[in-house]
Amino acid sequence: MSLSNLIQNWQMFRTRRPYEDQYKDAPYKWAMVIDLDTCIGCNACTVACYAENNLAVVGKERFGKGQAMHWIRIERYWGEGEEMKTDFPERGAQYLPMLCQQCEAAPCEPVCPVGATHHSADGLNTQVYNRCVGSRYCSANCPYKVRYFNWWNYPERAWPNPLELQLNPDVTVRSKGVMEKCTFCMQRLRAGMDKAKTDGRILADGEVLTACAQACPTSAITFGNLADKKSKVARMWKKQQVDLAKNVQDKTEEGIRGYRVLEELNTYPSIVYLERLRNFAA
Amino acid sequence: MIKHTMDRRDFLRVLGISGAAATLAGCGNTAIESGVEEVMSYVHPQDFVVPGIGVFYASTCTQCGSGCGIMGKVREGRVLKLEGNPESGISGGKICGLGQAAVQAHYNPDRLHTPMLNMDGGLVPISWDRASQILDERLGAKSSLQGDQIAFLSGGMSGHQRVLLENFLDSYGSKQHVCYDALSDATGRAATKAVLGTEQPLWDLSKSRLILSFGSDFLGNGVSPVYMAREFAKFRKAPRGTLIQIEPRMTLTGGNADRWYPIKPGTEGILALGIAHDLLQHPEFSGSVPQEVLDLVKNYDRETVSDITGIGADSVRLIAAQLWNNSPSLVVAGPAVYGHAYGFSNMAAVQLLNIILGNRGKTLQGQAEHPFPQMTPTPGTYRALAELTQKMQSGQCQALLITGTNPVFTSPSQLAFSEAMKKVPFKVAMVTHLDETAGQCDLVLPLLSAMEDFGTHVADYQPEGVEVLIQQPLMEKLYPDTRGFGDILLDVLRKRKADYAAFPDYYSYLKAAVVKAKPVFQSEESDDRFWETALMKGVIKWQGKTTALEAKLGALEVPNPRELSTDYPFYFIPSIRPDMRDGRHAHLPWLQESPETMTTIVWDSWVEIHPKTAAEMQIKEGDVLVLQSATGSIQAKAYLFPGIQPDTVSMPLGQGHTQMGRYATGVGANPYKIMDAVFDAHTGELALHATRVAIRKTGDNQMVVKDEGPTNVQHGQKLVATLSADQARLSQEI
Amino acid sequence: MSHSVHSHPQLDVQIERKFVPKAKDLGPDVSWAQINKDVLRSLEKPRPAFWIIFFSALALFSFGVYCEVYQYQNGMGVADLNNPQVWGLYIATFIFWIGMGHSGTLLSALLHIIHADWRKPIYRYSEAMTTFTLLTAALFVMVHLGRVWQFYYVVAYPNERWVWPNFTSPLVWDATAIGTYLTSSLLFLYMGMIPDLAICRDNARGARRALYKFLSLGWQGTDRQWGNFKVAYMTMACFLMPLAVSVHSIVSTDFAVSQNPGWHVTSFPPYFVLGALYSGCSGIITLFIVLRYVFRFEAYMTQPILNKLIKMTFAIAMVWTYLDLIEYATTWYGSDEVAKADLVYRATGDYALQFWGMIFCAMVMPFTLLIRYVRHNYTVLLIISLILNLGMWLERFQIITPTFAKSHYPWTWTSHWWPSWVQWGMVAGSFGWFTMLFMLYCKIFPSVSMYEVKEMVHEQNLEGKLAQPVSEHAHEAGLPEGGQA
């Protein structure tokens, strides 16, 4: 019983993740594609995230100290590659929506002393607030720096009455001293999966969306079930020749533009970005 | 297996709550036992209230005039989150950040929730009885107000609210419905109408092969940003169109351009003529172009244009060639074009390109005629406010009702609106938040929030036929002492006109009015069914036909812009933030904390300055600068921004509130107060881009609070990768 | 006292082989009675400086407590930590204190195993230093936690839900290693004290007597007791030595197993261990000088012993320097561009002052130990030993802060990040806490091992008598008093 669980769990520890066809028999593996050519940088996703996930507004002073809590942020870079070579951004700006990449080999997971951050069966990198002791090792180890720590008791000030009536009852309001991060809106996934289970089926493609994907006016964010080969997200991954279990992709086709950020660090992220396009003849 | 779940202890506990509540009340048990809280039964819940399950109700977003259909997730009687309504032709199930934040306007801790009366120079809370009594005395049946003595100042307004408002004014014989929009595009509309025959043509972004945008931020804060963004996404799919953006300060849309050009502010019309000059060289045009047009463009050869605009002669040629080769194209323009003393001409020159390129009927259509013109939105103008101010000054205006606009904050200081207000004996504001204008009124009435009120709206820009957009409450009102806008008007109106006695509240008025319009929509449903369907879908659609556009190539004169003087050596451009707009949303914490995309700055105002200019003037990020215009001066921190023309500085609008609650006040500065008194020669609108300033350092340096770190390039990491568009195979993508 | 000193079965052979005099670590006129008297006096009447030091430490500690309470109440935000800079001074100072502990074990265990007798007057306080630095380090483990009230989640305690700590996390290794090390050090310290506690017991009155009686576990000094004691003590020493090496190796894996630039370094374990020994040795020198003055231990903490200590410190400093430079070289010649950029940033960026400060304090300053004047002037030596440790603290700061300031992800880089007063307060408080505990210890327990110094005197006298002629000969040859220079 428990002992066999322990041994089984240990086997899971011992297996190098990810491996080929890891989710072949699993019902779900959540993944995303973000098209940087259609992302216009409008911040609809970030506000949607605040609304859905009870993110605290920290105020100017704390924002200035780098203690903001935006699970998804729009980064804006100038110049392609190394540096900005021209006086003006002639090819526009470069917007990058950066959220937790839900890595398959997440650097944050093995280092958590209490196992508060761990991998779920559907491929999410989850954070158990109740278990978190706040060592912040996960954040220290996260190459994308998308983990956000409750430096203060944010609920004290973030939702003065009656703003707290807006809080989503499906999402915990985090107290001081715990780490939090993008969950791929797992409260929505959970509710959807439970419903589907009751109906004796798996979720249809697009039946459940993350708040950011649902809001995105340009539909730049595609969210779905990678384990379902027919889902849009799975087809996009395949078309872009990105394999979840590879750190160096075999790109045989030309002109495809899927890549994963900082893939060379062997984190095996669950988010594929599609390269931004520019008409350099213009 | 069902276990025996109740033991003696539990049984007693239940007794304690129900039967023995009175005896236990003094014992200091739980809040329930002591009667502080009640145990609510869900055995007979209200319709659709299932504990733990969110239900979506359709409504319409009122955060801006786009009229996006939204759905509110309602759970346990609270509206939690807004999503786009897939039924809506405008939002198509999508929603912007500004729209999301509507729930924060609703739950805002600084909502006004009692009527306020100005007594001895200060506003004090009063009861509704008292407020009604005052309204009755001043405006009711015995009111002596007649004709234009009473004026109604509002923001852009449409739907039945507009109808009711104008009926209300009618009962006094007044025509003074004054609409003021601080970001008015009236000049642009007028010029477009003069050239194309319609104020706001429909753009077909997805069909365009190339979009040439002169400072139009259609993705950020144009006429319908969510719809445009949806269309833009299609435009970016195969065959991928190209966006060329020409503007003095990079907007959100500019950030998405394939090619972005910084141009000297105000010379856009000249560049357009230069491009036209180049285009008309094509033999296809020989003989078919009216002489006026040829005369108009003949002086604008590439070199001349290049000298004036700062855009290289090669670039002018390239842009013209691209336009020629990528048909159909679309030429659009924004405030950077029409915000000048000759904005009308500038805009007309830009629209001329659409005619030359033959975009009419291809990527440009006329909007369908609306069957209810009385419901269409009233575009706000500066001119109307200026005329009203004059009337107020002269004492002609005896009563002023204000809603949905905040001119004390947004009007330029030389208008002296605030002083003129003092001449009006009776001023009533209907607001959800006590803003600067309401603060100067005699009577302030608390309105229901957009999440609590009924209404109908008609969008400025109706891409798919004609729509009447339904707004319905997503929850019970939070504060008992708030009332709907329509209800307040009806209360007065019932006393003045007997035929309104049939409507006890705005809801009944609205329902009757909508149901009455049923035949127009060719519906065969019963009245109630029609109304319910409308509420359920949030929109009533009617397949209107797009109209043809005209091509009026009239005589046009596009002057060179005013040269910069040594006293005021910089162009000053106010930028419009997609979330703050004219400042009406500064009280929403999500928006304050949402980094402005181009600079990533939060909770502040700032001065954008080109790094080269800054280096010449030895200005570093965070240096506090004084911007001095002929009208006034303002202070803000410097932010070094490469996407700006080097002779230009820019500052975002919307901050600098002195009233409007804890989140809005004490944040940044208000650039409206340094706007020079420059007006468009044709329409009399305030020219927002025509101010010139001098910059002075105060010597102070403060941290610029922003999301961006010490670097804003990628340092060789593959974060945002860019591929040449011709290498991508978009058509094969999923 | 009837205990068996280390027997010298081949005493004669040894005597024949001696041509140069063995350094006399203690003066010739130290009698056993005098030892008892001196050490017991340290428990009663130290110099007034003791109270000055003790109360200053108490004040610092109180301030640290204030800072912690403040942080506990308001959240970690008061420390000005932020998204990339998640650890700040807390972890830097944690490594510092862990490191400090290591040399105590080196002196008490390793030198015991190899029969380096000069350790005897100074090992006791070194071992105490180890114990208290570990306690101080443990403080930082607590202080840095966001939810310190849930700290026990890190411990593998049995619970009905079978929830264990995550054994793949270096922090759990840390907690385990430090816990083991602390327990063992404490036990080792205590065990070594038992014979001395018995002496204290025999000479004390009142409450103290009760305390010593309780702690000395009925020590009578019988042969059997001594025999068992020696075996147990040696066993402990053998256990402790590898443990000490493992602890700082494990601490280094906190960083070495991560991917962050500047941390992902294979040579970190030996580098950390050597760094630990280095700062520990400097710490022992500091305390050597302080105790010598405060408790009037001039007769036991002598120049020859100090000389040996300094030599050892210098040697360790050089090995550490080598490992540090090796780390830079591998990064510099490697192909990890991000790590290289991070190295350049350390040397030229916001924390260049700290970087070069570290180079100066920890790499250049040890060379001053080669100067005879420095070794013999206690004031100067005290300052230099403190500077060495400042250098080592800066080294720890260098590991934490610049790596966070320039990680893989440019968007979240920080510039000029600096810890808030709360962090500094807690660092100061930790020094107060350590000093307070240490001073309290020295006031209550014999900080010089009486029985071992007696052994030493005994042996020295034995050797001294036998080696007299050679010694006189050496004197004629002009060797300075007290052995080699």
Image (cartoon, grey):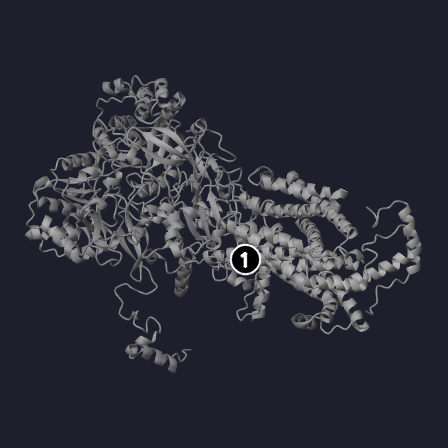
Q: Nearer the viewer, residue A180 or C151?
A: C151
Q: Which residue is mark 1?
A: C62
Quarter containing the N terminus of chain B: bottom left
Q: Chain of mark 1?
A: C
Residue B526 found in image quarter:
bottom left
Which residue is pictured at 44% across the width and 45% down the height?
A: A64
Q: Give x and y (percent) for residue B516.
A: 13, 51
Q: Quadrant of residue A174?
A: bottom left
Pick the residue in front: B178 or C2: C2
Image side of residue A21 versus residue B474, left or right = right
Report whether B606 appears left or right of B139: right
- List x then y, in percent, for residue C34: 78, 62
Please indicate, yes or no, whether residue C327 appears anywhere in the rendered image: no
Residue C250: % across, % down? 65, 55
Under tag 1, what secondary structure? helix
Q: Nearer the viewer, residue B148 or B375?
A: B148
Count of numbered tags: 1
Asked whether residue C176 appears in the rendered view, the answer is yes
Q: Quadrant of the C terminus of chain B?
A: top left
Q: Position of residue C421 (x, y in %)?
A: 51, 49
Horizontal arrangement in the rendering, residue A261 relative to residue B608 (left or right)? right
Disc 1 marks which amino acid?
Ser
* Residue positioned 78% across, 59% down in the render: C113
Q: Residue furthest bottom?
A: B8
Where residue B436 sits, quadrant-wise, is top left
